[in-house]
Image (tube, rainbow, N blue to C red):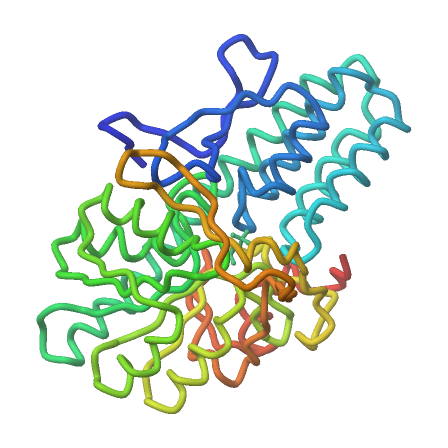
């Protein structure tokens, strides 16, 4: 996607080849800053501190983290150490483990002297594949948006999204936002309701920034507004991403997604979930087994913003002494999901639906 007229991905190898560069997402929307990551520790920190975030991008960052680790030490024990260090950064998105498994399998049987080059090349392939998958998701989701428009007899299509499942959450295009960009580019009038997504405000800070940059009409709403809008017929469809989807179609995504799905169900609003196949956890059937990240309470008790004079400040919202609980994700049961939008097509959120599209992956894949 473009920023200020220049094409960007969210992650790339630095011109000198000695590091990986990312867009620092903790600085958006107020500042567009590029960060250079030179080693395993910097890569692990970037994931943990959410300088990069979003399930597919976490996977891509982890892949490059392994490649960077090989520059320092290309031994088997360093490979295993990098795997463990990166795996421990965030627990919920399965793309992280998927990418690490892929990197370790790819490098394990190579001579040490080849591991840096092979690591960079494999990480680049993971990135290119992510872009291709998301583009295909965009095309498949576009058909759903066109159908929603036909159903209402034309006019503007109102879409509600939660968190950031746009190009910033992936290498490019995004998952849930890819169909929105394609619909907008195809001349369909789109308006997006953007959940602010407390506590880290990925909606207000990142999704709104992305949509604005692409010229897509949108309004930021508080996280609790969606039910009201759906009752009033102001949402034609919900479209969100996911950090891990079980083989039975349960969807784990940013905290608050489940409540939107309940409201959508109550109001007959289609609830679609967009995902590239590395987000499917074939080993799990029941979403309640997915580990839910708990982050520090400080993310709830404080909020970051820009003052009128341009200063970026964290301010405290809560009384001194009040503790906060900070659950990062929740699980939307498959029965509340109208359909899954994947790179291979749209399917029911059921084991049969996923197996029909991914028979090659589903068979015996117990990662
Ligand atoms: O905590 P985050 O910002 O990494 O959470 C991201 C999400 O929940 C996204 O919706 C999800 O990763 C899908 S992104 C394509």
- Residue 282 in percent (x, y) is at 69, 64
Residue at the far right in the pictured view: 77
Identify the residue at image location x=89%, y=27%.
76
Figure quadrant of the N terminus:
top left
Residue 224 falls left or right of residue 188: right
Residue at the far top in the pictured view: 16
Q: Is residue 220 above or below residue 101?
A: below
Q: Is residue 270 above or below residue 56?
A: below
- Residue 345 in percent (x, y) is at 42, 63
Q: 350 or 167: nearer the eye?
A: 167
Residue 50 falls left or right of residue 75: left
Identify the residue at image location x=40%, y=84%.
263
Residue 50 falls left or right of residue 114: left
Residue at the far front in the pictured view: 320
Q: Is residue 82 above or below residue 69?
A: below
Residue 33 in which image quadrant: top left
Residue 183 in which image quadrant: bottom left
Q: How many marks?
A: 0
- Residue 31 in percent (x, y) is at 36, 32
- Residue 228 in percent (x, y) is at 29, 83
Identify the residue at image location x=13%, y=68%.
156
Identify the residue at image location x=58%, y=38%.
60
Residue 150 falls left or right of residue 294: left
Q: 303 or 75: nearer the eye?
A: 303
Figure quadrant of the C terminus:
bottom right
């Amino acid at each position: 996607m473009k920023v200020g007229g220049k094409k960007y991905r969210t992650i790339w190898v630095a011109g000198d080849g000695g590091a990986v560069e990312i867009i620092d997402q903790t600085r958006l929307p107020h500042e567009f800053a590029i960060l250079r990551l030179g080693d395993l520790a910097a890569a692990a920190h970037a994931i943990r501190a959410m300088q990069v975030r979003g399930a597919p991008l976490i996977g891509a960052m982890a892949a490059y983290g392994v490649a960077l680790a090989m520059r320092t030490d290309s031994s088997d024990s360093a490979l295993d150490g990098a795997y463990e260090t990166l795996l421990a950064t965030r627990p919920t998105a399965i793309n992280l483990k998927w990418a690490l498994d892929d990197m370790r399998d790819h490098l394990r049987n190579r001579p040490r002297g080849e591991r840096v080059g092979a690591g960079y090349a494999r990480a680049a392939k993971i990135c290119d594949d992510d872009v291709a998958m998301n583009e295909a998701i965009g095309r498949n989701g576009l058909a759903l948006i066109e159908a929603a428009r036909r159903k209402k007899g034309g006019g503007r299509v109102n879409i509600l999204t939660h968190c950031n499942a746009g190009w910033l959450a992936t290498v490019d295009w995004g998952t849930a936002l890819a169909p929105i960009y394609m619909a907008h580019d195809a001349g369909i009038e789109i308006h997006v309701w953007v959940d602010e997504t407390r506590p880290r405000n990925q909606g207000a800070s990142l999704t709104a920034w992305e949509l604005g940059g692409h010229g897509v009409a949108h309004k930021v709403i508080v996280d609790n507004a969606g039910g009201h809008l759906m009752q009033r017929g102001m949402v034609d469809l919900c479209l969100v991403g996911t950090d891990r989807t079980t083989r039975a179609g349960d969807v784990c995504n940013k905290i608050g997604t489940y409540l939107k799905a309940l409201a959508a169900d109550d109001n007959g609003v289609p609830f679609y979930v967009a995902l590239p196949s590395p987000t499917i956890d074939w080993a799990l059937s029941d979403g309640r087994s997915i580990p839910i990240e708990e982050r520090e309470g400080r993310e709830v008790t404080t909020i970051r913003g820009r003052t009128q004079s341009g200063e970026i400040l964290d301010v405290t919202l809560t009384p001194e002494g009040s503790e906060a609980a900070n659950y990062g994700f929740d699980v939307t049961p498959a029965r509340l999901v109208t359909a899954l939008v994947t790179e291979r097509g749209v399917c029911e959120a059921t084991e049969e639906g996923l197996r029909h599209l991914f028979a090659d992956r589903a068979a015996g894949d117990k990662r």
